[in-house]
């Protein structure tokens, strides 16, 4: 079976369309893509390499590509302790990726939870629990 990049692109577009609608901004797909990337990268940098590899194994190709983009992994994780610190890091990533002026009409914590809920459709319940076990309770509540 060969790679079908058209299928990956279609799946990715469908996911972004669904997420944009879920966030109440179906016309802001670029900003939604930046938010998705910021959330995934913040989560990725907060959990262990081993757990990240378990996540990547379960994600569809279009999400794998976003998840591992610019990943420089090591055994040290970003020691964010609170949901507020996690949200601030997501906002920093959004700004880094060029998203600085969009009014979401929701808290960053709420946006994180909604983005992760969409991504979790691809993960087993056991994997979600494993991720939560690596996070402080305050951050795990977002997952």
Image (cartoon, helix red, strand yellow):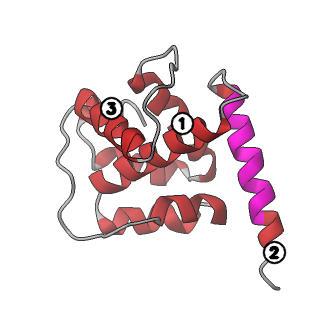
Residue drawn at x 65%, y 61% as measured from the top left: 62
**Mark sitting on residue 127:** none
For label 1, the residue is 115
Residue drawn at x 50%, y 19% as measured from the top left: 103
- Picture layout, residue 111 above or below residue 1: above
Looking at the image, residue 1 sits to the left or right of residue 18; the answer is right
**Mark sitting on residue 87:** 3
For label 2, the residue is 4
Q: Position of residue 70 (x, y in %)?
A: 40, 66
Looking at the image, residue 34 sits to the left or right of residue 80; the answer is right
Residue drawn at x 18%, y 37% as measured from the top left: 81
- Picture layout, residue 82 above or below residue 1: above
Magenta span: 8-21
Pick the quarter of the image with the C terminus.
Answer: top left
Lower position in the chain sequence, tag 2 or tag 3: 2
For label 3, the crowd category at 10 Å Cα-Cα, with few meaning under 14, some 14 to 19 and many 20 or more, is many
Confirm whether the magenta stretch covers residue 79. no
Q: Position of residue 85 (x, y in %)?
A: 23, 33
Task: Please tell me which residue lies in front, 141 or 93.
Answer: 93
Q: For the residue labelled by badge 3, is the local secondary structure a helix, a strand or a loop?
A: helix
For label 2, the crowd category at 10 Å Cα-Cα, with few meaning under 14, some 14 to 19 and many 20 or more, is few
Main SS category, magenta section: helix
Q: Position of residue 13 (x, y in %)?
A: 75, 49
Lower position in the chain sequence, tag 3 or tag 1: 3
Q: For the residue labelled by badge 1, is the local secondary structure a helix, a strand or a loop?
A: helix
For label 1, the crowd category at 10 Å Cα-Cα, with few meaning under 14, some 14 to 19 and many 20 or more, is many
Lower position in the chain sequence, tag 1 or tag 2: 2
Q: CA distance from mark 3 to mark 1?
A: 12 Å
| Residue at far top of view | 105
Q: For the residue labelled by badge 2, is the local secondary structure a helix, a strand or a loop?
A: loop
- Picture layout, residue 69 above or below residue 27: below
Residue drawn at x 28%, y 51% as measured from the top left: 46
């Amino acid at each position: 079976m060969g790679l079908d990049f058209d299928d990956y692109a279609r799946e990715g577009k469908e996911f972004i369309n669904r997420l944009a609608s879920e966030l109440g901004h179906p016309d802001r797909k670029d900003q939604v893509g930046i938010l998705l990337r910021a959330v995934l990268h913040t989560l990725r940098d907060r959990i262990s390499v081993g757990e990240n590899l378990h996540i990547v194994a379960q994600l569809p190709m279009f999400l794998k590509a976003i998840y591992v983009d610019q990943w420089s992994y090591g055994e040290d994780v970003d020691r964010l302790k609170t949901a507020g610190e996690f949200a601030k890091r997501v906002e920093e990533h959004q700004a880094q990726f060029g998203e600085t002026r969009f009014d979401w009409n929701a808290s960053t914590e709420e946006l994180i939870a909604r983005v992760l809920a969409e991504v979790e459709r691809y993960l087993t319940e056991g994997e979600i629990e494993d991720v939560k076990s690596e996070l402080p309770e305050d951050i795990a509540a977002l997952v």
